[in-house]
Amino acid sequence: QVQLQESGPGLVRPSETLSLSCTVSGGSVNSGTYYWSWIRKAPGKGLEWIGSIFTGGRTNYNPSLQSRVTISIDTSKNHFSLRLISVTAADTALFFCVRDSGGINVRFRARFDSWGPGTLVTVSS
Amino acid sequence: QSVLTQSPSASATPGQRVTISCSGGRSNIGSNTVNWYQQLPQTAPHLLIYGNNQRPSGVPDRFSGSKSGTSASLAISGLQSEDEAEYYCAAWDDSLNGVVFGGGTKLTVL
């Protein structure tokens, strides 16, 4: 059974860059079947999809974050990463790395069947 | 303001049936499948329903999903106290070229 685990700093200064990594075990990020995704939940708010990456580097990003976000994948380390630049307090959230098993056809996407436990990132000086 | 619209809250007593709705548009629910998530307090969300009405293994058949046009619903029958959680719908949006979530419905079991 695949397991995902987020890692990265819990505190980021305003205007700096948030960097998180997700290590995948029990499965391969190079499987060619799944999209690997980041989702966040800010305090008092709902779930927000940040973006996804497919093997080979194909990405989709939330239009509201697209100018600030980069998701990359490292098949040699079996992990994928999130980079969010120019953060503000509004980026404070619980960040989850997630597997989307909906496949290549977008009709079936958003089928997030495996989640990491989440990591809290606070943006504060 | 979420692209998919859910009522912020719902409540029912143990044993009752409750329905949570999710309203969208042609570019999301109208064109693509709907998935539902349950988030218990202090835990990561987990997949409850996928492909409009399919249950992953391990999800009790008390949970069911349906879709009609640009709306979808999650029904929970035989409500139990452990069903008290936040519920989210999600789908792909062709116009935004990305995943959209509902704002979430907090279910209280009275």
Image (cartoon, coloured by chain):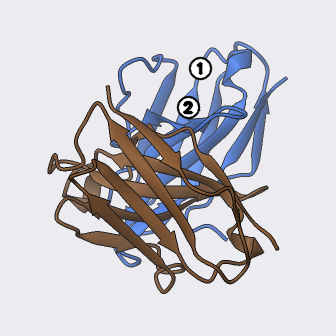
Q: Which residue is mark 1?
A: B77
The quarter holding residue A60 reads: bottom left
Count of numbered circles on the image: 2
Q: Which mark is residue B108?
A: none
Q: Is residue B32 left or right of residue A30?
A: right
Of the 4 image quadrants, the one containing the C terminus of chain A is bottom right
Q: Toward the viewer: A16 or A84? A: A16
The quarter holding residue B69 reads: bottom left
Tell me the amino acid under the disc marked 1.
Ser
Of the 4 image quadrants, the one containing the N terminus of chain A is top left
Residue B38 coordinates in the image, percent (x, y) = 58, 35
Q: Residues within 10 Å of mark 2 (few under 14, many from 20)?
A: some
Residue B7 coordinates in the image, percent (x, y) = 71, 52
Position of B109 relative to B101 (above/below): above
Residue B66 coordinates in the image, percent (x, y) = 43, 40
Q: Which mark is residue B75?
A: 2
Which residue is pictured at 36% across the width and 62% down the height? A52
Q: Toward the viewer: A121 or B31? A: A121
| Element on which disc 2 rests | strand
Identify the chain of the residue marked 1, using the numbered disc in the image: B
Position of A124 relative to A104 (above/below): below
The residues tagged by marks 1 and 2 sit, at their Cα atoms, a distance apart of: 6 Å
Identify the chain of the residue marked 2, using the numbered disc in the image: B
Residue A109 coordinates in the image, percent (x, y) = 32, 54
Mark 1 and mark 2 residues within 8 Å of each other at the beta carbon? yes
Tell me the amino acid under the disc marked 2.
Ala
The answer to whether one can see residue B68 in this image is yes
Q: Which chain is blue?
A: B
Chain A colour is: brown
